[in-house]
Image (spheres, rainbow, N blue to C red):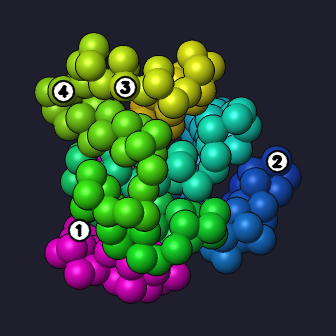
Amino acid sequence: MAHIQPLENDQVDDELRQMFEHYERTRGFCPNSVKTMARRPNISKAFGRLNQAILYEGTVAEELKMLVALATSVASGCEYCQSHMANLSSIYKAPDEKISALWEFESSDLFNDGERAAIRLALKAGMLPNDASDEDFTDLKRYFDEAEIVEIVATIALFGYLNRWNDTMATQLEEYPTQVAERAIGEQGWSAGKHK
């Protein structure tokens, strides 16, 4: 059970209501994490702007950023974020087979070498202690320019925040991303855990 209950649309100001409605249109629901942050409106609003700048702007493919966020969440063990990122990976055109194959990204034909380099860094950087190395960045530079590497690391860092937020708050997992996660990553031992 969540430690802090999320707010509803009628409990927030117009700017947050518009943000909640945007999530509802694009994902089919508004994440409880954002609705809980709304208890301090400026945190929720700042998060929304940061999330937009990191995940939806730049030149790194959105599909890859979603898979990087999923890998970061796998490394940290945050089941809430794993389910959300399986859902967003699907929304941003990653086939279920590719989402399910994330655990075999090094050998799966579904991933190219650039994706492997980014996912490898996400797994290493999502762990504590951080295991990212000079070699990881040398590999990334073969496929991405410096601005794109900043996008990839920003995605990892954003999910460092979200993984800690949702696991600490025991944010209640919404029904739709639960269904997507069960379908796409359930075979890998995923469960809603404390986010039920």
Nearer the observer: mark 3 or 4; the answer is 3
Q: Tell me, for residue 89, which label it has, or none.
A: none
* Separation (CA) of disc 3 from disc 4: 15 Å
* Separation (CA) of disc 2 from disc 4: 39 Å
Residue placed at 21% from the left, 26% from the top? 130
Q: Amino acid at mark 1?
A: Lys
Q: Secondary structure at mark 3?
A: helix
Q: Are marks 3 and 1 in contact (CB under 8 Å)?
A: no
Q: Which residues are magenta?
A: 167-196
Q: Are marks 1 and 4 in contact (CB under 8 Å)?
A: no
* Separation (CA) of disc 3 from disc 1: 36 Å
Query: Looking at the magenta stretch, what is its main secondary structure?
Result: helix
Residue at image mark 3: 139
Residue placed at 57% from the left, 16% from the top? 146
Nearer the observer: mark 2 or 4; the answer is 4
- Nearer-N-terminus badge (3/4): 4
Nearer the observer: mark 1 or 2; the answer is 1
Residue at image mark 1: 194
- Closest to the observer: 65 or 10? 65
Residue placed at 85% from the left, 52% from the top? 14
Callout count = 4
The reply to whether residue 17 is visible in this rendering is no
Q: Amino acid at mark 4?
A: Asp
